[in-house]
Amino acid sequence: MVPLSTINLSDEAKPGYRDEFHLDLVFKDHLRMKTNLVVAPAYSYLQYFLINIPATFDQEGKTIYKARNEIKVMDIDGITIVVKKYKRPHIINQIAYGYFRKSKAQRAFLYAQKLLSLAITTPAPLAFIEEKRYGLLKESYFISQFCHYPHLMRELWDYKASDKSALIRAFAAFTASIHNQQVYPIDYSPGNILFEKSQKEYHFALIDINRMQFKQVTPRMAAYGFRRLRVDEDTLAEIATAYAQIQHIEVKSFIEKTQGFHQKFWRKPH
């Protein structure tokens, strides 16, 4: 745990983080480790819990995913949170993220704020943490609320409900809606799209959002964006048809582009 005497607090607004709470911590030893914590204003009361996440991550919480990155679920003060620890970058990216580029954790935090401002559902961001040694990024964490939507779009592969077509149309409409708001998820994979059904309506949420672009989405980009969906050709064609009709795109050519990108992607080993 971090002794409070080593914490230097500052809540001054900084460029790019208007109104966020900032905390910088420096270990006074040969490692010259600096920990930067940025907390959303609504959760500043959790600052002392959050700053200790790097020290307690291995022991606390329940792991729900572990591969390149590790994701844990934790409970604090009546809130279920998700903590994502990103894999330590290689030395070139340690320099890039330390001095020139926003880290994945920082981008996830900022993009979540952006999506929520557009009324696009994503788990509320609590904070992000960066640990740097001699200015090089070593470890980073993104902390958000837990999303309680019970389904992943992975289920579209073997979704047995009688309203599969309704789900497809709703998904196409959701995708068109975010594209029309100039939101383009680069990792638009079925594991990053959650959904729930409320009465007769489907609602969707985006997770794992550190790779996104905010710009006008062309039909070619839209077709390319569907490439990661693990679905059969008929289901993909149904998605592409619904999207094209909503966007007033020529249906046949859009289906062909979508299927072409999809086939090329899934020919590669994954």
Image (cartoon, grey):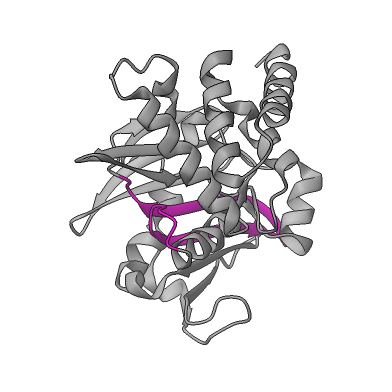
Q: In the picture, residue 264 is in which quadrant?
A: top right
Q: Is residue 170 above or below residue 177?
A: above
Q: Which residues are magenta?
A: 119-147
Q: Residue at x 31, y 25 (%)?
A: 163
Q: Is residue 200 left or right of residue 219?
A: left
- Of residue 26 and residue 257, the one placed in the foreground of this image is 257
Q: Is residue 37 above or below residue 223?
A: below
Q: Is residue 120 magenta?
A: yes
Q: Is residue 195 left or right of residue 71?
A: left
Q: Quadrant of the N terminus?
A: bottom left
Q: Quadrant of the C terminus?
A: top right
Q: Is residue 224 left or right of residue 11?
A: right
Q: Residue at x 36, y 31 (%)?
A: 166
- Of residue 31 and residue 76, the one placed in the foreground of this image is 76
Q: Is residue 2 magenta?
A: no
Q: In the picture, residue 170 is in which quadrant?
A: top left
Q: Is residue 41 visible?
A: yes
Q: Is residue 82 above or below residue 77?
A: above
Q: Give the prevailing secondary structure in the magenta stretch.
A: strand
Report the label total: 0
Q: Is residue 240 left or right of residue 100?
A: left
Q: Position of residue 225 (x, y in %)?
A: 65, 36
Of all residues, the one furthest to the right in this rendering is: 92
Q: Position of residue 246 (x, y in %)?
A: 54, 44
Q: Position of residue 91 (x, y in %)?
A: 78, 44
Q: Is residue 193 visible?
A: no
